[in-house]
Amino acid sequence: MAGSIRDRWAEWLLDRRCAGDAGKHEAALQHYRRWRDSVLENARLAAGETLLDVGAGDGLIAFGALDLLGEEGRVIFSDVSQDLLDHSRALAEEMGVFGRCRFVRAPAHDLSPVGDASVDAATTRSVLIYVEDKGRAFEEFHRVLKPGGRLSIWEPINRFGRSNYPPDGRLFAGYDTAPVRELARRVHEVFARIQPPGTDPLLDFDERDLLAFAEAAGFAEAHLDFEARVAPYGASGDDDALDWDSFFRIPGNPKIPSVEEAMAEALTPEEAGRFAAHLRPLVEGGRGTERWAVARLWAVKS
């Protein structure tokens, strides 16, 4: 499968996100399914309806919706990645549900292949963090929904965790790197250059902005749940948070390198060895602070 992957979105989602490790993939699915179920619950789907899943990725939400929609229901898979659409199309054929699915290549801010007032519900998960014009995306969500249609969104609020990555290098991912501050600063600069904290879509909004976008787009009502935690890594029961290989080799999103790759770019081999030797016992011992936040928004078109 890896040999057929071409674009970075598919490469990350289908392989790099779990470093090609089937065990890590299955463990991660436990989290993803809970998040999917939350999105679908807020979408309030009914049998026979049509759902548009924006940024459908590998189809987690879209395929999960089919049982809720019944035999007469339909799902539109929308994504910017043709490779991911092809992947989902192949899965749909294998599952015998291809006739209930439609696949369109479109970004969240331009859903022109989807007609006005043509879907009953729209969903996204971890999609708006890559969209520059989020206001326009909300306008598109509103446009494609029928009167009474529902929007359900799940988005990480990455701005909440920025204090875990101060530019002076005294912390790195919430771990104390003061003894290797200069090395941490140079590794941090690799990520900051790719995703500048002040302007990158991943970091340019918070939960209040999501509500404002929904209201400005014309939704008659909007609701938001905000969940956040500040705690030692592993305190939530996520053993993967203490796994050095996951921390070191798995990129945090499709647009950035892994910590290992960033170190190779910013440091000499000797420096990279010192930096890893300092960080590894902190990661494996959970001796850092996790700052994590997510917003769940659902809205209704009048």
Image (cartoon, rainbow, N blue to C red):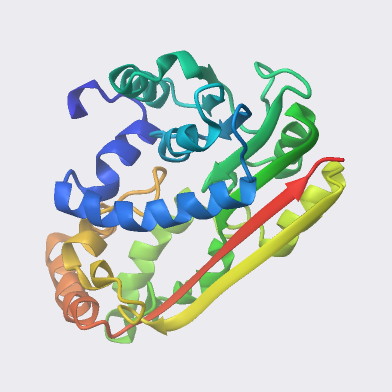
- 35, above or below 87, in the image: below
Task: Give percent across and percent down for residue 80.
Answer: 51, 27
Q: Quadrant of the N terminus?
A: top left
Task: Give percent across and percent down for residue 97.
Answer: 40, 20
- 152, above or below 3, in the image: below
**Could you say which is closer to the camera, residue 257 or residue 243?**
243
Task: Give percent across and percent down for residue 7.
Answer: 36, 27
- Specify whether residue 202 is in view: no
**Could you say which is closer to the camera, residue 179 or residue 221?**
221
Q: Is 102 positioned to the left or the right of 175 in the image? A: right
Q: Quadrant of residue 2?
A: top left
User: Which residue corresponds to the image point at 35% horizontal and 32% vertical from the top-left?
Assistant: 10
- 35, above or below 20, in the image: below
- Specify whether residue 294 is in view: yes
Q: Quadrant of residue 226?
A: bottom right
Q: Is 292 positioned to the left or the right of 122 in the image? A: left
Q: Quadrant of the C terminus?
A: top right
User: Which residue corresponds to the image point at 23% horizontal and 49% vertical from the top-left?
Assistant: 25
Residue located farthest toward the top when viewing the structure as drawn: 99
**Could you say which is closer to the camera, residue 175 or residue 181?**
175
